[in-house]
Image (cartoon, coloured by chain):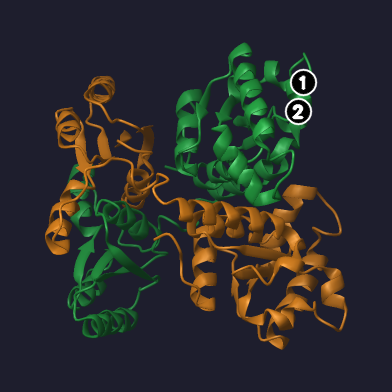
Chain colours: A green, B orange
Amino acid sequence: MKQIIFYISDGTGITAETLGHSLITQFENLDVESITIPYVDTTDKAMAAVKKINNSFKKNNSSPLIMATIIDDEIRKIISSSKGNLFEFFSIFLHPLSNILKQPYTHVTGRSHGVFDQKYYKERLNAISLSLTCDDGMGTNHYNEVDLILIGPSRAGKTPTCLYLALQFGLKAANYPLIDKDLNKIATPEFVEEYHHKIFGFLIEPNRLKLVRQERTGTSKYASETQCIWEINKIEKFYKINKIPYINATNLSIEEMATKALETLNIARKFI
Amino acid sequence: MKQIIFYISDGTGITAETLGHSLITQFENLDVESITIPYVDTTDKAMAAVKKINNSFKKNNSSPLIMATIIDDEIRKIISSSKGNLFEFFSIFLHPLSNILKQPYTHVTGRSHGVFDQKYYKERLNAISLSLTCDDGMGTNHYNEVDLILIGPSRAGKTPTCLYLALQFGLKAANYPLIDKDLNKIATPEFVEEYHHKIFGFLIEPNRLKLVRQERTGTSKYASETQCIWEINKIEKFYKINKIPYINATNLSIEEMATKALETLNIARKFI
């Protein structure tokens, strides 16, 4: 049976989706269909959302789940009058939090993913811009400005991890692919010594690397088993000789690679 | 007084940070210091975290807040023995959710930000890759493959919004800057007619655009008031003539721009 989930928020819906998704992945073999309704910030919009929820109930003859973040009491009340099972993530924590912090909460909607702090906003845009400048071995002359430098074979997830670090945490994240010329010559790239404390290495199993590369380029020397094994061996030696911390990223998500890099290099996250 | 917040998780800590940040932005004038401890997945690590929390208590003579997502009951118990005020976001919802879904939850940690679904993981990497290919007016020959195309003046937030859409939702998001040559000629770019249903426009107040550009290029024609006013006027006319939906993005965050674009174009989010 299909389980319908409505994510409802008076803001973007991202917080509701993030926690809701975390909770739902704890249940296996669920056939989930998700519907997000953002910006439910008037009673009219709340009533329109209730109508959608009740239609889903009627159509599927089963109560949908509602995962919600709603600041306004009246809107929350309207949503809770629907035929869905409501999990509202704000109200349950805001009251005890208010007692501990000894101040009322603002009741202003959409604060967490809005531009409420211009300084952070600008810092985040700059981080994204610099990370793009320093993508894929470019912009090495900016390495004095970056927070970290991810290195590893091409197609191991360095670029997505850098973009995630910039977007999520406002960190300036460069990445540098170790290619044949780096691995063949005796001297390592100059930046390795100067910025050693910023460098984190990725490894990936040769077989997985081969598959990822084949998907992109088809059969080629670059995607051959021999090349992938040679590269990974060389790169692991490179890390050991240069005392660069590294992880096997084969089974890690972007979020996990990002988190491991920050943890190892002892870099504090921003924006939290 | 400074409020210390520990984000503690047996996974990456991202869910704890997201909800915790949403809650905390409801309180004004808090001087917050955040510390994230990810991968607390053994009793030893839990006890080490408790030590850090208790040290913070001793040093500041005030209980830190703990925002946590912990699946394992024993680890949660250890953390709750500390001198912090614990808000744990999983346990409170998992039991009622388990009753509704009529199945136990898996108790496996780190599921939500892990690579538990290879298909999604690949789709997400492809989305990031294509979004980079179609950044800043490049890759228009791939517009048949993309989910949406953001257009607008240069430096209005198109690139970060596209990267966010790709990373967060696995959507293939192109962006195209409307520059003088598009605005001066009578014929609009060819893709506008063919992919009209995928296009969403950004506007930004000329004054804000001027400031953003000046920060990047200093004084220049590109960053002049005259140029910014001229561009924005032309672009708004362009949207109206071509019947392109648009928003004023001046005071919107990346998440808000992304959400508004999806809502308007009626594009479903993925990965939720």
Observer-nearest residue: A230 or B82?
Answer: A230
Residue A5 percent across, percent down from the top left:
29, 68
Give above or below for A137 relative to A103: above
- Disc 1 to disc 2: CB gap under 8 Å: yes
Give above or below for A111 relative to A139: below
How many numbered circles are shown?
2
Give me the disc on residue A12. none
Q: Residues within 10 Å of mark 2 (few under 14, many from 20)?
A: some
Give above or below for B173 relative to B243: above
- State which quadrant residue A123 falls in: top right
Q: In screen coordinates, is A189 left or right of A152?
A: right
Residue A126 percent across, percent down from the top left:
64, 45
Q: What is the chain letter for disc 1? A: A
Amino acid type, mark 1 = Asn
Q: In screen coordinates, is B177 left or right of A54?
A: right
Q: Could you tell me if residue A165 is visible in this image?
A: yes
Measure the C-alpha gap from mark 1 to mark 2. 6 Å
Observer-nearest residue: B1 or A124?
Answer: A124
Question: For the N terminus of chain A, which image quadrant?
Answer: bottom left
Of helix, strand and loop, which one carries label 2?
helix
Residue B241 percent across, percent down from the top left:
72, 87
Q: Which residue is mark 2?
A: A180
Residue at x 80%, y 77% (from the top left corner): B189
Give me the disc on residue A184. 1
Of helix, strand and loop, which one carries label 1?
helix
Q: In screen coordinates, is A216 left or right of A268?
A: right
